[in-house]
Amino acid sequence: MRLEGKTAIVTGGASGFGEGIVRKFLHEGARVVIADINRDAAHALADELGADAIAISADVTDGRSVEQLRTATKESFDHIDIVVNNAGVTHLPAALDEVTEEDFDRVFQVNCKSVYLMAKTFIPDMKARNAGVILNIASTAGVSPRPHLNWYNSSKGWMITATKTMAVELAPFGIRVNAVNPVAGETPLLSSFMGGDTPELRQKFISTIPLGRFSTPEDIANASCYLCSDEASMVTGVCMEVDGGRVI
């Protein structure tokens, strides 16, 4: 029960790493808002998980929608202790000069602008309480970029830098900010990262991970739980690699 008495919002919480984080946080005693653009999936997960999980449909690239998320959250919970910026997308593997402007804009709106909007909306309440935790789900792609995912890599590098600058600025207000850098995992985005999903492509990718497997939602959730718990009360500005050694 490491998160007992805490309340959390997890963006993109209806699937993939986000769903893993939601389940882990609930298991550790938190109350959780599943914020997802996929309304049906969010409500289905909340119905499965019980009264301590609520679903709120939200588009984290839209300021008005994020403000509505705050309003709806406060109707159910008095305050938010933890914000997990997990929502993310990628473009398909391509030469950097062949990625469409539409795909570029979508990647940076979901992966970067959403972090700004969530901060702009939720940090004032955290400042008023002189407490709070923000966790950004970044990527090893922002640490050790590979060809053909250039603009996705760049968006995650932005998120890593944002994490560190947020941590420095918000520390005087008692707010901690950290990130988790996963390697590719068993999520809906896996085939997009690899440019398909075949046994051969999987084996080629896994061969670059020293521990010899993809990450799982449970791996990311366990790291997230630690960073958001009081056990990590002296940890801020850290971007923790959960990658089986890929970036070594």
Image (spheres, rainbow, N blue to C red):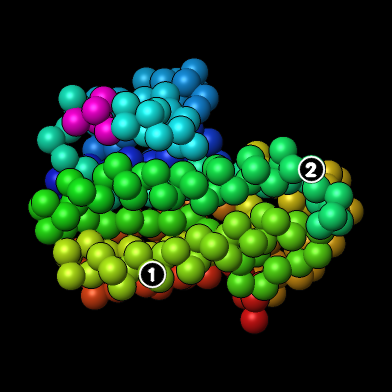
User: Total label count?
Assistant: 2
Q: Is residue 210 visible?
A: yes
Q: Are marks 2 and 1 in contact (CB under 8 Å)?
A: no
Q: Is residue 236 visible?
A: no
Give the residue type that dot 1 points to. Answer: Thr
Is 72 within the magenta?
yes
Which residue is drawn at the image coordinates 58% and 65% (left, top)?
157
State the image coordinates of residue 128 (x, y, percent, origin top left): 11, 51
Is 168 within the magenta?
no
Marker disc for residue 165: 1
Going from N to C along the chain, the mark reached first, 2 or 1, is 2
Alpha-carbon distance for marks 2 and 1? 30 Å
Which residue is drawn at the image coordinates 10% and 52% (left, top)?
129
State the image coordinates of residue 195 (x, y, percent, origin top left): 83, 47
State the image coordinates of residue 182 (x, y, percent, origin top left): 56, 61
Q: Secondary structure at mark 2?
A: loop
Which residue is drawn at the image coordinates 38% and 69% (left, top)?
165
Which residue is drawn at the image coordinates 44% and 64% (left, top)?
162
Kindly indicate the quadrant of the structure image that contains residue 167.
bottom left
Q: Which residues are magenta?
A: 70-74
* Residue linked to disc 2: 100
State the image coordinates of residue 45 (x, y, percent, origin top left): 43, 26
Marker disc for residue 222: none
Camera-side residue of 58 and 193 = 58
